Image (cartoon, rainbow, N blue to C red):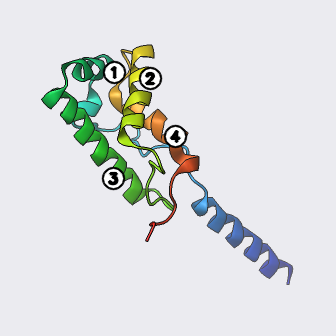
Amino acid sequence: MVVIRSMKILLSMIVLLFLLPLDTQAKDLKDEYAVFGVGGKTCKSFSRAIELGGRPYKEYESWLFGYFSAYNQYTPNTYNILGARRMDQIITWLETQCKQYPNQFFVTAAAILLRNMYETRRNFSPK
């Protein structure tokens, strides 16, 4: 009887562990991962793209849409990480972050943004 109860508690703890959001990212054994596109550029490059507008800016915007879509797809209990935010609000936050940390990789700024938005994400489709 004690063994069955202990197994139930252990199983419950394991299930809870999988339901909790993880504050880590998938990385290799050296704590690294591949970044493609403008995510591998610095925040200084993003700030410059905003100044230039047009195609340079659109590259960052497109990269962000893909990054957010991948996050939505692979993060449990997440329909839309942006929640009720508009893209112009996201860009403003990233501009501020990148002015403060110009040598930071853009993907790092985007990851910090995601962490900050997690609690206010949409968990379900508005349908």
Mark 2: which amino acid? Gln
Say which element carries label 2: helix
Q: How many marks?
A: 4
| Pointer 3 or 4: first along the chain | 3
* Neighbours of disc 1 within 10 Å: few (<14), some (14-19), many (20+): many
| Pointer 3 or 2: first along the chain | 3
Above-or-below relation of 125 to 31: below
Say which element carries label 1: helix
Q: Which residue is tagged 2?
A: 97
Say which element carries label 4: helix
Q: CA distance from mark 1 to mark 2?
A: 8 Å
Residue under the image location 44 percent in, 29 percent down: 93
Q: CA distance from mark 3 to mark 4?
A: 15 Å
| Pointer 2 or 4: first along the chain | 2
Q: Nearer the viewer, residue 86 or 36?
A: 86
Farthest residue toward the right? 2
Q: CA distance from mark 2 to mark 4?
A: 14 Å
| Pointer 3 or 1: first along the chain | 1
* Neighbours of disc 3 within 10 Å: few (<14), some (14-19), many (20+): some
Mark 4: which amino acid? Arg
| Pointer 1 or 2: first along the chain | 1
Q: Which residue is tagged 1?
A: 43
Q: Which residue is tagged 4?
A: 115
Residue 69: mark: 3
- Residue 70 in sight: yes
